[in-house]
Image (cartoon, rainbow, N blue to C red):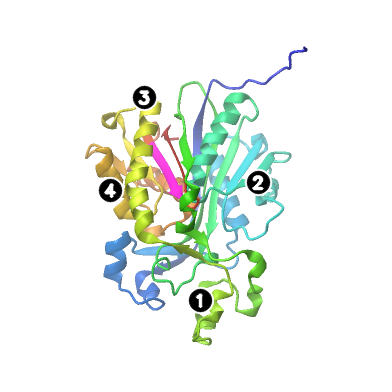
Amino acid sequence: MMALRTSSGAQYARLMGVGGYRPRRVVDNAEIVTYIDSSDEWIRTRSGITERRWASPDETIQMMSVAAARKAIERAGIEPGQVDTVIVSTVTHLIQTPAIATTIATELGAQGAAAFDINAACAGFCYMVAMADALVRAGSSKYVVVIGVERLTDLTDIHDRSTAFIFADGAGAAVIGPSDVPAIGPVVWGSDGEQADLITQTEPWDTAIPRHERGGPDPVAQAAAVADDPEGSAAATWPVLRMNGNPVFKWASYAMAKTAAEAMDAAGITPEELEVFVPHQANNRITDAMFRALKLPEGVVIARDIVHHGNTSAASIPLAIETLLESGEARSGQTALTIGFGAGLVYAGQVITLP
């Protein structure tokens, strides 16, 4: 039998640069409580959130993705034409096909790049890092742009007391390329489909009434539609996200701490050696529970991006990394543990060296 030729790439891969885009509109808790029966104190206590960003109509999935990716490419010190692969993780690109990664790649100037979308919910960034790491080391790609982007407000029922205050919009990107030293640890990932109903879209698109008939998915337009329809049928015509909070909180707080510990062990890192902890920005209480379960030292820098930006799903980890680096709380070269978890239920984590 003839032996096939295979490809080989760099011995290691690393994050070379990160970039983010946060929508212009800041929505504080005072506005949120006009839509739900709650209070600023209750929201802060339950989640840590004080404000979040909601995208305006012009801040589309593509626009936010390109803005974030351009920053990441510039910080990585490469040219857009050197990017040969673009991966986008999103659950809120409302067109089934083509993948939005293709048009993002073209707008970035990454002509001819391989481009595809994935749906791994809030674990999407860690999934993409794992894939990009493997592609670079296998020689299938050299420079990979990964983008986590969401307009979660398009799928949020702002009258749902359990989710209205949590979800937000934004994009976070990273460039992953070859490295002379190990800089991305082994991924620890998996899923638990038996609990898929804990975080889910309420109905499939083929049963949804077209958005223009109910004012569209814009949160304020939804509120106006529901006000004109006190029986609540307006809110039910557009698919929204629902979450069973208590089971999700328990699963994320404790089961994910085990996954995070496994990711550190796989990378050969002890809690005492870890410098930065960047979990998916789901809830400050979950972050605190994981920190305690992992027995991390007090000196570890913890990402708290959720306080000002809410839960942006696949965008939350790269946005949080950018915030830490820009603020000086963390610095290039430090060892960071990242872990994402969400609808599916899916999860993934790895130790990385900050760009």
Residue 209, given in percent of the width and then of the height, sits at: 65, 74
Label 4, label 1: how far apart the Cα atoms are: 34 Å
Residue drawn at (36%, 28%) of the image: 265
**Residue nearest the viewer, comparing 282 with 332:** 282
Where is residue 329? Give x, y as percent: 32, 43
Residue at mark 4 to residue at mark 3: CA–CA distance: 23 Å
Quarter of the image that includes the N terminus: top right
Q: Which residue is mark 4?
A: 289
Whole-angstrom CA distance, mark 2 to mark 1, is 32 Å
Residue 220 is marked as 1
Q: Which residue has dot 2 on it?
A: 108
User: Of marks 2 and 3, which one's residue comes earlier in the chain?
Assistant: 2
Look at label 2 and name its amino acid: Leu
SS at mark 2 in the image: helix
Image depth: mark 4 or mark 2 in front = 4
Instruction: Give the magenta range.
Output: 337-342
Mark 1 surroundings within 10 Å by alpha-carbon count, few (fewer than 14), some (14 through 19), many (20 or more): some
Residue 155, how many percent across, how many down?
53, 65
Closest to the camera, between mark 2 and mark 1, is 1
> Disc 3 or 1, which lies upstream in sequence?
1
Q: Secondary structure at mark 4?
A: helix
Image quadrant holding the C terminus, namely top left
